[in-house]
Image: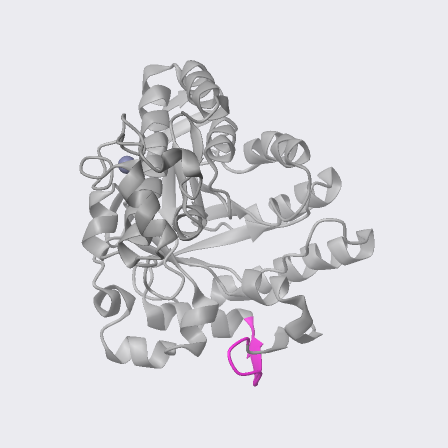
Amino acid sequence: MHFEVTATDGAARAGVLRTAHGDVPTPVFMPVGTKATVKSLHPDEVSEAGAHILLANTYHLHFRPGEQLVAELGGLHAFMGWNGPILTDSGGFQVFSLRDTITAVDDEGVTFRSVYDGTAARFTPESVARIQAQLGSDIAMCLDVCPPAGVSAREAEEAVRLTTLWATRQREAPHASGQLVFGIAQGGSDRELRTRSIAELTGLDFDGYALGGLSVGEPRPEMLDTVGWAAPLLPAEKPRYFMGIGDPEGILEVIARGVDMFDCVLPTRLGRTGTALTSHGRLNLRNAQFMRDPRPLDERCSCPACTRFSRAYIRHLVNQQELLGLRLLSLHNLRHLLDLTAGARAAIQAGRLADFIANALAGDAREPQ
Ligand SMILES: [Zn+2]
């Protein structure tokens, strides 16, 4: 079995996901290496921060540098110098979130203009399976139709229909040796549509399932309510992946509802805006109050930034747009989310997740020190 649940606490689960490049303890936060790099960080730094698996974007790697080139250089693991597990998305999210670039959607696939140079491109279930096979990722995602929140009932239903049709074909397409394939359920927050999508996808027997089309603009209470009733509809013995959530509260709330995997660009994106995630909330290092602050970003953190540098110094780096400032904040934010997820895992094993979440969120809500 490639997935084993080892402990539960309410709806939450702790487990182990087994991949061709190693075991992944769950729940797990997957740092995003969009273009085969977690921005500004060496793979060893990402590993030392506690990451067990990375996400890379099929859309971007398809256009730059191209899956053929990556394959010639030994596949994505060798190419980017990361020997741990890698999940690749299907590219569908990028295509459907860049809605202005779509020129046609039909039963066979989606035609769009490349965001890089505007040239015509086409993704089909077969082509994204082939791209991900050439990249050689450990987990490949199905091509899905991911509409934004608030689309018409007809458009939402069409997204579910095409997502199932494409998943059926991608299930049969060739994959890399040992590559797991996950289906993605759509349907937004509509109970009937989401239930139908989950039933159709689980009927295809994938290695894992993602809840897609959430956290796409709908109110957070509605999103969490949907995860709460939708996650239990997925098979208990398969990993569950929530695509695109990475703020501390969001992570903890989806873990509590039975999600095992999640990803987000937040830690590095916040780093680039001079923001640190800490156990007492977010710090905006541009704020003048940190000018003479000798304390670390977070006294509870043992990352390379917090063990050596002051808020005052990092603020100086950020204000001068020094690369080290970006790197230190990215390292810290990554560590913060990975520590938080590891803490949640330990709490599930100890049967005290609710207390852990209450404590973590109480700190998160406090005024920054
Ligand atoms: Zn730190």
Residue drawn at (34%, 69%) of the image: 135
Residue 115 vertical placement versus 277 (above, below) = below
Left/right of residue 108 with respect to residue 338 in the rendered view: right
Is residue 250 something that shows in the picture?
Answer: yes
Residue drawn at (75%, 54%) of the image: 157
**If the image is split into quadrants, where does the N terminus sit?**
top left
Left/right of residue 223 with respect to residue 262 in the rendered view: right
Residue 189 vertical placement versus 39 (above, below) = above
Residue drawn at (57%, 49%) of the image: 212
Q: Main secondary structure of the magenta part?
A: loop
Left/right of residue 215 with respect to residue 272 in the rendered view: right
Horizontal and vertical percent position of residue 330: 33, 48
Counting labels gives 0
Residue drawn at (27%, 26%) of the image: 299
Q: How is the image coloured?
A: one colour
Horizontal and vertical percent position of residue 188: 68, 46
Question: Which residue occupies the foreground of this view, 314 or 119?
Answer: 314
123 magenta-colored: yes
Write the start and end of the magenta stretch as one range: 115-124
View quadrant of ligand 1: top left
Tell me which corner region of the image, top left, top right, bottom left or bottom right, holds residue 93.
bottom right
Horizontal and vertical percent position of residue 64: 40, 77
Horizontal and vertical percent position of residue 361: 47, 22
**If the image is split into quadrants, where does the C terminus sit?**
top left
Is residue 203 something that shows in the picture?
Answer: no
59 magenta-colored: no
Question: Which residue occupies the foreground of this view, 72 or 82?
Answer: 82
